[in-house]
Image (tube, grey):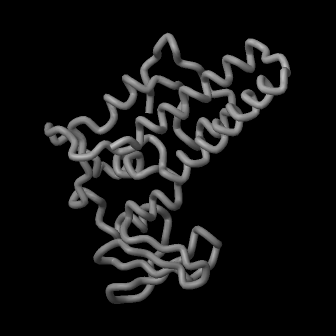
Amino acid sequence: MHLPHHHACRVLPDLHLARRLRLHRIDPPDCLARVGVGMSFDRNLLPEPIGFYENDGLVLTGRGKWRTTSCVFHGGSDSMRINTTTGAWRCMACDEKGGDVLAYRMAVTGEDFVTAARALDAWVNDGRPALYRPTTLSPRDALALLAQEANLVAVTAANIANGVPVTRSDLDRTLTSAGRINLVVREYAL
């Protein structure tokens, strides 16, 4: 997701974390206003399960509602079961499971809900205001970001309290941390 540039934006220095959190710039006012407006998830637009799994390279064997296939999560040759009606899936060996093709795509690719739904053409512009605002970060990633940034702010505060000089770079990074913490707070505010 591209977030608009703003004079207070700073590029995240930890690119691995940036990719994982799908945040590349900090711009709380604009980025939150643009997320989810007039968009919604339509389950009826999810692909038909058999075609989806076969297009993903899985070979479904057996007859009936539940079919057998290989597990991409642990490499088992015949431990995954696929429900051909709902798209639900479960590996009997590693216990990975999900309720539909969307959950499968999210598990395989690591995409968040909105990204996976868009990739499956099930996230559509319905012309109405969104009933909820999807978040940029999952709750787990938000907590990880808060922990990392709060730790950095605490170290800077401890240095100041102990008379350790703070460089301009340290101060800038601390202000960036404060901006990220505020972004998460705004993202999850009711």
Left or right relative to 162: residue 29: left
The answer to whether residue 99 is above or below residue 162 is: below
Q: Going 85% across and 21% down the picture, which residue do you hit?
A: 164
Residue 188 locus on image (x, y percent): 41, 43
Give the residue at the far bottom of this rendering: 63
The residue nearer to you, when weighing 41 against 179, is 179
The answer to whether residue 123 is above or below residue 15 is: below
Q: Going 83% across and 26% down the picture, which residue do you hit?
A: 162
Residue 115 locus on image (x, y percent): 41, 46
Quadrant in the rendering for residue 72: bottom right
Quarter the N terminus occupies: top left
The residue nearer to you, when weighing 53 against 169, is 169
Left or right relative to 104: residue 157: right
Left or right relative to 108: residue 121: left
The residue nearer to you, when weighing 161 against 64, is 161
**Mark count:** 0
Q: Going 46% across and 38% down the picture, which residue do you hit?
A: 185
Residue 130 locus on image (x, y percent): 22, 42
Quadrant in the rendering for residue 165: top right
Left or right relative to 103: residue 171: right
Q: Going 33% across and 44% down the picture, which residue do you hit?
A: 190
Quadrant in the rendering for residue 173: top right
